[in-house]
Image (cartoon, coloured by chain):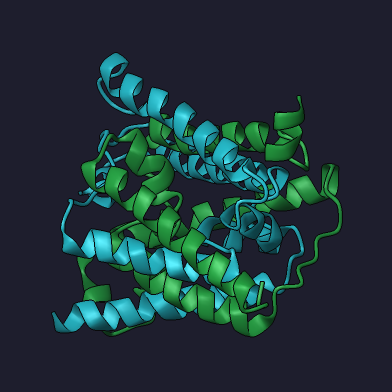
Chain colours: A cyan, B green
Amino acid sequence: MSVATDADQQHPAVRLLRALCVLAGGMLFGFGLALSGMIRPETVLAFLQLRDMGLLLVLGGAAGVATIVYQLAPRLLSRPLLGGRFTGHPGQLDRRSVVGAAIFGVGWGLCGVCPGPAIAGLGAGLWPLGWAVIGLAGGAWLHGRYASRR
Amino acid sequence: MDTLARLFPDGWAHYLLGGLLAGAGVSLVYVGTGLVGGTSSFFSATWSWVSRLTFFGEPRWREQRAWRLLYAVGLIAGALLWALSMGTPQVTAVPAWQLLLGGLVAGFGARLSGGCTAGHGICGLASLKRESFVAVPVFLLTAIATAHLMRLWGLA
C-alpha cells in the first residue's frame, strides 16, 4: 500500500483535490450518520435490544450503495479519478479477525457507540460521546501495545 | 402497515436516507482516491503521531494518518452541518463510565479484528471480503447479547 508514495508524485493541485474528496466523503458520511440517528447511543441500543430495526436499514443502505460502487468502479475505471489504486478492504479471515469482532460487539453493546458515530456525534454537539472517543483511543492503544509484543 | 410501525416505531425513511448518504460518502472517497474509508483505523493512525510503540511505527500508519485525520474532520463537519440545517439538540442518558468502558472494549476489538461497523460492515462487505462476512454477524450477535444483558441488569 503506497498511497502516500503515489500521492507524493502527484501534482499539488491533484493532491489538494484528493484531500477535498476525502473531506467531502467524510462529510457525507457524517451527515448520514447524524440524519439516521446513529450518533445517539439510545437509537443503536434500541436496535441491539431488538426494539427498533432502523439500524438494519442504515447498514443495508450504506453497504448496498458501497457494494455497487466498490464492484463497478474498478471495472469501469482503470484507476480512481484523482489517482491512486483501487484496493479493497485490507485483511484476511483468521482467528484474530473473528475474536476481535466478538470483542468489538461486546463493547458496542455496552455503550451503543461505534467509531464513526462517536467521532461524528461530536459535530452535532453530543459532548458525552467524547468519553467514547477517549475509550476507543485507549482501546486502539492497548491493541497497539499488544500487537507490538506479538 | 402495522408490521412496519412495529419494526420501525420512529419511522424508517430517515434511517434509509441516512444510510444511503453514508454509503455515498464512502463511495465518493473510493471513486475519487481509491482509499477505503473505515473509521476505527483513525485511532491507530492517530497514535502514530505520538506513540513510540513499534506497531504504531509501521510505515502504513504514517502513510494513512493524514487522510484519516481529514476524514474524521469531515465526519464532524458533516454532523455539524446536519445540526445547523435540520438537526434537533442531541442528548444521551448513557452514563460516562459506560461510554468509556464500551469504547475501550470496542476500540481494542475493532483494531484486533481489522474493522468496525464501517470497516467491516460497509467497506468490507462492499469489497466482498470473507472475513467481513464472518465479522459482521459475529459482532452483531455479541452486541445484541450484551445489550440484552445490560437491559436485564437495568443498565441500559
User: Residue A29 placed where, x, y %?
Assistant: 58, 43
Quarter of the image that includes the C terminus of chain A: bottom left
The answer to whether residue B49 shows anywhere in this view is no
Question: What is the residue that sits farthest to the top in this orientation?
Answer: A76
| Residue A15 x/y as whole percent | 41, 42
Q: Residue at x 56, y 80 (%)?
A: B100
Q: Residue at x 32, y 24 (%)?
A: A71
Above or below A109: residue B119: above
Residue B130 appears left or right of B146: left
Q: Where is B61 relative to A34, above or below?
A: below
Left or right of residue A104, residue A119 in this image: right
The image quarter containing residue B31 is: top left
The image position of residue B142, as x and y in percent, is: 42, 62
Residue occupying the point 63% across, 60% down: A45
Q: Quadrant of residue B73?
A: bottom right
How far from the left and from the top, in percent, is residue A84?
A: 29, 36
Height in image: B35 above or below B39? Answer: above
Nearer the observer, A86 or B147: B147
Q: Is residue B18 visible?
A: yes
